[in-house]
Amino acid sequence: MNRLLLSLALILTTLPGHADPIVNEKSEIRFVGTQMNAQVKGEFRQFSGAVVFDPESPETGHAELSVKTGSIDIGLDDGNLTLQQPEWFDVDRFPEARFKATGFRALGGERYEAQGVLAIKGHEEHMVVPVAIHRNDDGSLTASGEFSVRRLPFALGSGDWSDVSLVSDDVRVLFRITVSK
């Protein structure tokens, strides 16, 4: 789930070579998983990053997104505390998840793919994240999209939590990231 979050935030920028910061109050990183056949929805409330992106030359773009793992919120205090424990995000040892995009590929229209590496709990995995990028009236850019992430390769939900009949391995990540002009 953090993969998508990181990837999407990295796609937005305005000027080639100039890193534009994420506007948190206009951005969101949400996720949906399944526990015992019931949907669990949540979000990360704290993240930061910067993006360099030029729609005329997307392959030269790059970005970096950092998500504060302790800012996870599923709307239940006990659930939030559980997700901060070593079996899940282990926020004391790994306070951040990071996505570093090394390039973008144009798919046509306002659609792109961000290629990069997602790092969570000391594990890294190459990712390709689809994203739609729209220029707003004020010149800022908004990237949005969704993708699926497998949690087990990142040791998210170890021990009894690794039973995929209890908690599904696939987590859908949905994002909307706005970058200032």
Image (spheres, rainbow, N blue to C red):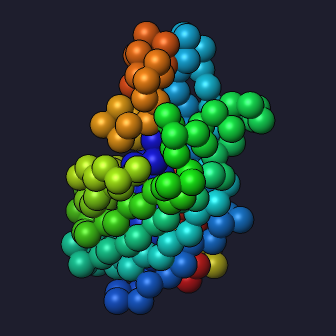
Kindly identify the residue that appears in the image at 77 percent across and 35 percent down: 77
Task: Work out whether 48 lies above or below 107.
Answer: below
Answer left or right for 79 relative to 140. right
Residue 92 at least partly seen? yes
> Which is more toward the observer, 177 or 63?
63
Asked which quadrant contains residue 61, the reply is: bottom left
Answer left or right for 136 relative to 126. right
Kindly identify the residue that appears in the image at 63 percent across and 33 percent down: 82
- Residue 167 at what x, y percent from top left? 48, 19
Answer left or right for 116 relative to 72. left
- Residue 16 at what x, y percent from top left? 35, 87
- Residue 73 at what x, y percent from top left? 69, 42
Task: Work out whether 111 lies above or below 100.
Answer: above
Kindly identify the residue that appears in the image at 60 percent across and 42 percent down: 84
> Which is more toward the observer, 6 or 85?
85
Kindly identify the residue that appears in the image at 60 percent across and 14 percent down: 38
> Which is more toward the observer, 143 or 153?
153
Q: Quadrant of the N terminus?
A: top left
Q: In which quarter of the image is the C terminus?
A: bottom right
Total label count? Answer: 0
Task: Work out whether 9 lies above or below 175.
Answer: below
Task: Work out whether 80 lies above or below 40.
Answer: below
